[in-house]
Image (spheres, rainbow, N blue to C red):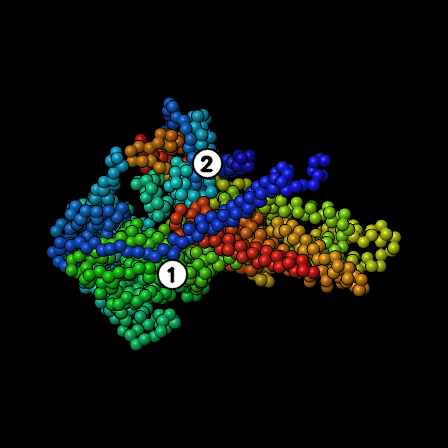
Amino acid sequence: MKKTLFSTILVIATSAAAQNAITVDPKLPDYKTQAGISGNLNSVGSDTLNNLMTFWAESFRKVYPNVKIQIEGKGSGTAPPALISGTAQMGPMSREMKATEIDGFEKKFGYKPHAVAVALDGMAVFVNKDNPLKSLTLQQADAIFSATRKRGGEAITTWGQLGLTGEWANRPLSLYGRNSASGTYGYFKEHVLSGGDYSSSVKEQPGSASVVQGIEKELGGIGYSGIGYATSGVRALSIADKGTPIAPNYENVEGFKYPIARYLYVYINVPPAGGDHLTCEFIKYILSKAGQADTVKDGYFPLSARAAAKAMADSGCK
Amino acid sequence: MSRLAKPFHASSPASRRLKLIDRLADAAIRLGGVSVIFAIALIFVFIVREIVPLSAKSTIGEGQVHRIETDEAALLLAGSDEFESTEFIVKRNGAIELHSLANWSESSVLRSQLLGGRRVSAASLASRGIMFLGTDDGRIAIVELQFNATFADDARRTITPLLKELALVTLPSSTGPIARVVGRTNDSGLAFVAQTSDRRLFAVNITQQGLDLAEDEKGQLSAPEEDALDGPFQVRSLAAPSSEVVALAIDSQADRLFVATKDGVLHHWQLGDTTAKPFAEYENPGLLAASLGLREPSERDSSRQITALNVLLGDQSLIVGYDDGSIEDWLGVRQGKNDILRRVRPVRLFDSMPEAVVALRSSGRDKTFLAAAADGSVHLAYVTSGKTLASYLVAGHPLELAYGAKLTSAMVITQEGNLDYRAVSNPHPDISMGMLFGKVWYEGYDQPEYIWQSSSGSDAFEPKFSLVPLIVGTLKGAFFGLLFAIPIALLAALYTSQFLSSTLRATIKPLVEVMAALPSVVIGFLAGLWLAPALDDKLPSLLFFGVVVPVVILTVAGLWHYAPRVLKKVFPAGREVFVLVPVVALCGWAAVIAGPFVERLVFAGDFKQWVYDAFSVRVEQRNSIVVGIAMSLAVIPMIFTLSDDAFSNVPKSFSSASLALGASRWQTAFRVIVPTASPGVFSAIMIGFGRAVGETMIVLMATGNTPILSFSPFNGMRTLSANIAVEMPEAPLGETHYRILFLAAFLLFVLTFVVNTIADVVRQRLRSKFQAV
């Protein structure tokens, strides 16, 4: 936990320096405390959202000390099985649920789970802070990480192929990625590799923190994770689709100009007859001004008031 | 105490008590033994029970035939809602007829206002219930059929169908009927390709903004005469095909278009590039499979005509059906090294159908598809394995097919106006022996390969369940573990049992055995977080260390022979080790220090770069050497203690005889003790191997867990056991992936069971052999 706090402070420091501090939309609703909220909440799912869920849970518990919240984050792929088996009321996911997963849920409950967008993420491709590379095209990223190279081009294995010179020219790339349970793994595969397969030389890490840690320690390291895991030892590259490279900052992500900007979701089980009160209050808190301030604190980007209102409507909560 | 000293009589109370205790102990031990066997048998039964359903055959239920009222025999389109509770058909008069599948008489009709009484001549169904209806006056109506589910208080579901009108597109200077239309919903909006009966092809894109414009104009969208390549409403006319069109297919992004014509050409358009010509044309497609060696050439090949086309979910596979009933799967394959666009070619053949293939329909959830032939036979096949999973026969001549959204139903509409509805159960289409253990040509690859990539974040993903990389990884991990463990453990055991003084042996053996109690998670943790980064830049030092230490040991041992008598008196036989250890430690330390110099001298200053340049192998931080070292820590105590026992159990008379005949201690150890103890040593190694194969935590934490098929010591591996640990939480209960993980567990179980049994049998033999001596 200390480490997370430490890295969070770093994130705040770096993001503050780079983007003059992100302010949450003043039109977001304030959270109104309700009477008689208590009970247990379990959350199983995304590792990308793990720290953020912890932040929300901590501040939610400041409002309702009688609420107990347990958070487990091993990957988005673990959320649907947990929601279906009823071991969790909330399933944070960094990708959308697959139709087959929704089918599984529906078979058990008779209705669909509700997807609530809770934050914005400019999924980042990180390199070591001492790496001189500034930007990457999606085609290059595909040629680096995939075995199928659907975007074309030759396989990229050394930094020289990305235009670096000197001692970097012959240095091989060392690839870090996530394991297949991860939604980030799935999202990157879908949107960067165009649905292709990862190269077998990508080291599959169980969490985003270990991806970033690997790149920090290795000069030739490159890998992807949610922007919230940025540390001072790594640098996020600007990404170009076809035009100019675009940096993963709030402005570009919020306008979806950044090619791999995405929403992060929390899936909840709300019966059509009306949801369980506690889950809904938690969702309301997340989508409030205070909840979105936590999002910024963790290094992700907050929702606009409009997006938050739409997410609230999607949640099925009254 | 004195009571015990008394001789027992059979009837004395003490003797009876002892007998009772004896019997109780006997029973308890038996019970324990039997429960262990019972528990193992239970685990076995549980594992097998989870695997068995994998072999379940796909089944298709009895057909329910419903009569459809038609004004004309030909119906255009059929489908069902996402709950597979309501079926719909599109008729030529523009009516969309809905029936409840549970109760056929419950029906309703929806009509599009946009059609305004026009007759429909072609139709296409895209995702989200969006339909493209081509009219006989050259227009295309786009409507969205929604099924809104509402829930009553008792959680009963009511489905209300609703028709949303999106747009009516008028094509440039067109009055003839639309012969074919294929439409899709893609990332930017809607897209379709329409073919008029006068053989003209139009590609149309409508963005969300374009749909908003249409809404303002009451749905009317008229195309300009000139091609419009930009903006919210893009229309492009494609070069007219060489002869009459027989089939059209388009991928989900409306990017690739395939057009089969009567003159036997398959045209491949890339709609993204706006050149006027097709990207590729394949002449005589029916000949290709034979020329690529996929089938025996036959005289019929050249006359084979394409009759149906379908792009499979994921946009990688093109399913091609011919008039002789053969079905092929075509994949995009890179021609040159850097081709962005890939030409398609046949890679897989399916079971031939009796007559011409008339309809192909792919699933929206996985890689299965349905095919119907003119004689009424219907096949359900899985693309990756090329297997036909099930087949059945409907009465009449099929015209159109529909595959339920949840893949639990199949519908065939016949020319005779019948709808044949069947329940489909297809629990594990994605499994076969060939896919588990053989090379498979997966979508997006340029040749067949062994790959493990079990799941991803989308349904279009093709699961790749080859166990080969995992089995190889398991053996690789065990191999490198034993590579470090065997020499150290065996030599150490030989030394302690034959040369070391017995007092020292009494301390050293238990010490090594204590090592076995070290939890493997601790070893793995240290290996992953400390050893791997520490070794990362010291690999040359390690290699140098590996060369220097054995040389130093042999040299010191040789020199000891000439050592002054005083020294030999201080360190008598069995205690020479106190001389060796400091020397070895010193030299080892020197080797580590000298490592960088060696690196500069031999490997041009950068070992990793040198390996990469020489073998084009990347030196990964978490490699097999790290795993080998960590694994050897777990295996050494086991091999050491078992082989030490084997060496010590050689009867004293053997070595005494050998020494008496004038053999040296070394000769005795190597020529007498080692051969005699070899079965015991063998069983020790086998048990060590069994442990290394089943080891989970060390490999899980010390490797990158990459399911790579490589024997290089400089990269990692994924073992069967680590794979189970990594993927179990994400595997949905009862699905193929989940069961394959159990299959992996079963393989591990069998492997360790066999290895341990062999080891034990060998040990038993050895024991009885020595009892005879």
Identify the residue at horizontal 49%, vertical 58% (top origin). Answer: B469
Decide: few, some or many residues near mark 2? Use Cα within 10 Å; few <14, some 14-19, many ≥20. Answer: many
Disc sitting over residue A71 in the figure: 2
Q: Is residue B373 above or below residue A282?
A: below
Q: Which mark is residue B385?
A: 1
Secondary structure category for the residue under label 1 = loop
Residue depicted at 86% across the width and 52% down the height: B569
Q: Quadrant of the C terminus of chain A?
A: top left
> What is the three-letter code of the residue carrying label 1?
Ser
Q: Residue at x 72, y 54 (%)?
A: B497
The tag on residue B719 is: none
**Residue A237 x/y as whole percent:** 48, 47
- The picture places residue B608, in percent across and down from the top left corner, at 60, 56
Is residue B710 at least partly visible in the picture? yes
Is label 2 in a helix, a strand or a loop?
strand
Q: Indicate the chain on which mark 1 is placed.
A: B
Q: Residues within 10 Å of mark 1 (few under 14, many from 20)?
A: many
Q: Identity of the amino acid at label 2?
A: Ile
The chain under label 2 reads A
Residue A201, given in percent of the width and then of the height, sits at 51, 55
Taking the spot 32% from the left edge, 67% from the top edge, the residue there is B281
* Most foreground residue, B631 or B617: B631
